[in-house]
Image (spheres, helix red, strand yellow):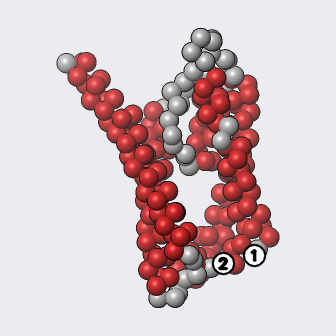
Amino acid sequence: MNKRAKFELKKPLVLWSLTLAVFSIFGAFRTGAYIVYTVMTRGLKHSVCDQGFYNRPASKFWAYAFLLRKAPQLEDPIFIILRKQKLIFLPCVLSVMYSYYALRAAGFRISRKFAVFITLSQIIQRLIGCVTNYLVSQWMQREQCHSHFQNISWSSLMYLSYFVLFCLFFFEAYIRSKMREATKAD
Protein backbone atom coordinates (compact mmCIF):
# COMPACT_ATOMS: atom_id res chain seq x y z
CA MET A 1 0.00 0.00 0.00
CA ASN A 2 3.04 2.31 0.13
CA LYS A 3 2.63 3.48 -3.48
CA ARG A 4 -1.16 3.37 -3.58
CA ALA A 5 -3.75 5.87 -2.46
CA LYS A 6 -5.75 4.97 0.59
CA PHE A 7 -9.21 3.51 0.04
CA GLU A 8 -12.31 5.28 1.31
CA LEU A 9 -14.27 2.39 2.80
CA LYS A 10 -16.79 4.30 4.89
CA LYS A 11 -19.94 2.33 3.98
CA PRO A 12 -18.39 -1.16 4.13
CA LEU A 13 -16.65 -0.28 7.41
CA VAL A 14 -19.88 1.03 8.96
CA LEU A 15 -21.77 -2.08 7.86
CA TRP A 16 -18.98 -4.41 9.04
CA SER A 17 -18.62 -2.76 12.44
CA LEU A 18 -22.37 -2.44 12.95
CA THR A 19 -22.91 -6.12 12.12
CA LEU A 20 -20.22 -7.22 14.57
CA ALA A 21 -21.55 -4.80 17.21
CA VAL A 22 -25.11 -6.11 16.97
CA PHE A 23 -23.87 -9.72 17.05
CA SER A 24 -21.69 -9.02 20.08
CA ILE A 25 -24.46 -7.15 21.91
CA PHE A 26 -26.94 -10.02 21.44
CA GLY A 27 -24.32 -12.56 22.48
CA ALA A 28 -23.33 -10.54 25.55
CA PHE A 29 -26.94 -10.21 26.70
CA ARG A 30 -27.73 -13.85 26.00
CA THR A 31 -24.71 -15.36 27.74
CA GLY A 32 -24.33 -12.58 30.28
CA ALA A 33 -27.84 -13.19 31.64
CA TYR A 34 -27.00 -16.85 32.26
CA ILE A 35 -23.68 -16.03 33.91
CA VAL A 36 -25.17 -13.34 36.17
CA TYR A 37 -28.00 -15.69 37.15
CA THR A 38 -25.54 -18.47 37.96
CA VAL A 39 -23.24 -16.20 39.98
CA MET A 40 -26.19 -14.80 41.95
CA THR A 41 -27.83 -18.16 42.67
CA ARG A 42 -24.89 -20.55 42.90
CA GLY A 43 -21.77 -18.43 43.38
CA LEU A 44 -18.62 -17.57 41.46
CA LYS A 45 -17.02 -21.01 41.66
CA HIS A 46 -20.04 -22.74 40.17
CA SER A 47 -20.33 -20.13 37.40
CA VAL A 48 -16.68 -20.70 36.44
CA CYS A 49 -16.51 -24.46 36.87
CA ASP A 50 -20.00 -25.50 35.72
CA GLN A 51 -19.90 -27.31 32.39
CA GLY A 52 -23.70 -26.98 32.03
CA PHE A 53 -23.19 -23.69 30.19
CA TYR A 54 -22.07 -25.67 27.14
CA ASN A 55 -25.03 -28.05 27.32
CA ARG A 56 -27.91 -25.56 27.25
CA PRO A 57 -29.03 -24.80 23.68
CA ALA A 58 -28.94 -20.98 23.84
CA SER A 59 -25.70 -20.63 25.78
CA LYS A 60 -24.09 -23.42 23.76
CA PHE A 61 -25.01 -21.65 20.51
CA TRP A 62 -23.61 -18.29 21.67
CA ALA A 63 -20.44 -19.85 23.08
CA TYR A 64 -19.69 -21.54 19.76
CA ALA A 65 -20.84 -18.54 17.72
CA PHE A 66 -18.44 -16.40 19.74
CA LEU A 67 -15.59 -18.73 18.82
CA LEU A 68 -16.60 -18.88 15.16
CA ARG A 69 -16.84 -15.08 15.03
CA LYS A 70 -13.10 -14.92 15.61
CA ALA A 71 -12.41 -15.96 11.99
CA PRO A 72 -14.19 -13.01 10.32
CA GLN A 73 -12.75 -10.73 12.98
CA LEU A 74 -9.32 -11.47 11.51
CA GLU A 75 -10.44 -9.35 8.54
CA ASP A 76 -10.45 -6.17 10.68
CA PRO A 77 -6.82 -5.35 9.83
CA ILE A 78 -7.74 -5.31 6.13
CA PHE A 79 -9.81 -2.15 6.69
CA ILE A 80 -6.95 -0.60 8.63
CA ILE A 81 -4.36 -1.42 5.98
CA LEU A 82 -6.47 -0.36 2.99
CA ARG A 83 -7.30 2.93 4.70
CA LYS A 84 -3.60 3.43 5.58
CA GLN A 85 -4.16 3.75 9.29
CA LYS A 86 -1.88 2.68 12.10
CA LEU A 87 -2.21 -1.05 12.86
CA ILE A 88 -2.06 -2.08 16.50
CA PHE A 89 -2.27 -5.57 17.93
CA LEU A 90 -5.15 -5.37 20.39
CA PRO A 91 -8.52 -7.13 20.51
CA CYS A 92 -11.33 -5.25 22.33
CA VAL A 93 -14.52 -5.45 24.36
CA LEU A 94 -16.49 -6.30 21.28
CA SER A 95 -19.99 -4.95 21.69
CA VAL A 96 -18.75 -1.55 22.86
CA MET A 97 -15.75 -1.48 20.55
CA TYR A 98 -17.64 -2.29 17.35
CA SER A 99 -20.38 0.19 18.27
CA TYR A 100 -17.65 2.80 18.67
CA TYR A 101 -16.07 1.80 15.34
CA ALA A 102 -19.44 1.93 13.56
CA LEU A 103 -20.19 5.40 14.89
CA ARG A 104 -16.71 6.68 14.03
CA ALA A 105 -16.85 5.14 10.55
CA ALA A 106 -20.23 6.79 10.00
CA GLY A 107 -18.60 10.14 10.69
CA PHE A 108 -19.84 10.79 14.22
CA ARG A 109 -17.47 12.61 16.54
CA ILE A 110 -17.07 10.54 19.70
CA SER A 111 -15.61 11.89 22.92
CA ARG A 112 -12.09 10.77 23.73
CA LYS A 113 -13.49 9.71 27.11
CA PHE A 114 -15.36 6.92 25.35
CA ALA A 115 -12.11 5.57 23.86
CA VAL A 116 -10.50 5.75 27.31
CA PHE A 117 -13.50 3.86 28.73
CA ILE A 118 -13.11 1.10 26.11
CA THR A 119 -9.41 0.72 26.84
CA LEU A 120 -9.96 0.65 30.60
CA SER A 121 -12.70 -1.94 30.07
CA GLN A 122 -10.20 -4.05 28.16
CA ILE A 123 -7.66 -3.78 30.97
CA ILE A 124 -10.25 -4.74 33.59
CA GLN A 125 -11.53 -7.61 31.44
CA ARG A 126 -8.01 -9.01 31.06
CA LEU A 127 -7.32 -8.62 34.77
CA ILE A 128 -10.53 -10.51 35.57
CA GLY A 129 -9.41 -13.23 33.14
CA CYS A 130 -6.07 -13.55 34.96
CA VAL A 131 -7.77 -13.74 38.37
CA THR A 132 -10.29 -16.30 37.08
CA ASN A 133 -7.50 -18.48 35.70
CA TYR A 134 -5.72 -18.30 39.05
CA LEU A 135 -8.89 -19.32 40.89
CA VAL A 136 -9.56 -22.21 38.50
CA SER A 137 -5.99 -23.47 38.92
CA GLN A 138 -6.48 -23.42 42.71
CA TRP A 139 -9.86 -25.15 42.51
CA MET A 140 -8.43 -27.76 40.09
CA GLN A 141 -5.79 -28.75 42.63
CA ARG A 142 -8.53 -29.39 45.19
CA GLU A 143 -10.54 -31.29 42.56
CA GLN A 144 -13.37 -28.77 42.87
CA CYS A 145 -13.23 -27.62 39.27
CA HIS A 146 -12.82 -29.60 36.07
CA SER A 147 -10.33 -28.06 33.67
CA HIS A 148 -6.96 -28.84 32.15
CA PHE A 149 -3.65 -27.33 33.18
CA GLN A 150 -2.77 -26.70 29.53
CA ASN A 151 -5.98 -24.68 29.01
CA ILE A 152 -5.26 -22.60 32.10
CA SER A 153 -1.65 -22.02 31.01
CA TRP A 154 -2.53 -20.85 27.49
CA SER A 155 -5.45 -18.79 28.72
CA SER A 156 -3.28 -17.14 31.38
CA LEU A 157 -0.60 -16.37 28.82
CA MET A 158 -3.19 -14.82 26.51
CA TYR A 159 -4.85 -12.71 29.22
CA LEU A 160 -1.54 -11.59 30.69
CA SER A 161 -0.09 -10.62 27.31
CA TYR A 162 -3.26 -8.69 26.38
CA PHE A 163 -3.24 -7.04 29.81
CA VAL A 164 0.31 -5.81 29.20
CA LEU A 165 -0.50 -4.70 25.64
CA PHE A 166 -3.57 -2.74 26.74
CA CYS A 167 -1.65 -1.12 29.59
CA LEU A 168 1.09 -0.08 27.17
CA PHE A 169 -1.51 1.19 24.69
CA PHE A 170 -3.26 3.13 27.47
CA PHE A 171 0.00 4.72 28.52
CA GLU A 172 0.99 5.66 24.96
CA ALA A 173 -2.43 6.85 23.79
CA TYR A 174 -3.71 8.68 26.84
CA ILE A 175 -0.91 9.43 29.28
CA ARG A 176 2.14 10.03 27.10
CA SER A 177 0.09 11.95 24.53
CA LYS A 178 -1.20 14.25 27.33
CA MET A 179 2.37 14.71 28.54
CA ARG A 180 3.44 15.69 25.00
CA GLU A 181 0.54 18.14 24.70
CA ALA A 182 1.47 19.70 28.05
CA THR A 183 5.11 19.99 26.97
CA LYS A 184 4.11 21.69 23.68
CA ALA A 185 1.85 24.11 25.55
CA ASP A 186 4.75 25.20 27.76
Q: Position of residue 167 (x, y in %)?
A: 38, 46
Q: Position of residue 174 (x, y in %)?
A: 37, 35
Q: Residue furthest right?
A: 57
Q: Is residue 122 visible?
A: yes
Q: Residue at x 65, y 30 (%)?
A: 78
Quadrant of the image containing the C terminus: top left
Q: Give, as a three-letter code, the residue at label 1.
A: Asn
Residue 13, compared with residue 170, is above or below; it is above
Q: Which mark is residue 55?
A: 1
Assess disc 1: are there few (<14), some (14-19) or many (≥20) residues with their C-alpha within 10 Å of its C-alpha: few
Residue 76, compared with residue 44, is above or below; it is above
Query: Looking at the rendering, which quadrant does residue 76 occupy?
Result: top right
Considering the numbered disc 1 on the image, is that residue within a helix, a strand or a loop? loop
Q: Residue at x 46, y 85 (%)?
A: 141
Toward the viewer: 154 or 22? 154
Considering the numbered disc 2 on the image, is that residue within a helix, a strand or a loop? helix
Contact between marks 1 and 2 (CB within 8 A): the answer is yes
Q: Position of residue 21 (x, y in %)?
A: 67, 44
Q: Is residue 107 visible?
A: no
Query: Looking at the rendering, which quadrant does residue 134 occupy?
Result: bottom left
Q: Residue at x 48, y 32 (%)?
A: 111
Residue 12 appears left or right of 96: right
Residue 150 appears left or right of 75: left
Q: Position of residue 13 (x, y in %)?
A: 69, 29
Q: Give, as a three-letter code, the residue at label 2.
A: Gln
Quadrant of the image containing the N terminus: top right
Q: Residue at x 69, y 56 (%)?
A: 66
Q: Which mark is residue 119?
A: none
How many circles with numbers are drawn on the protein? 2
Per the image, the residue denoted by label 2 is 51
Residue 31, compared with residue 139, is above or below; it is above
CA–CA distance between discs 1 and 2? 7 Å
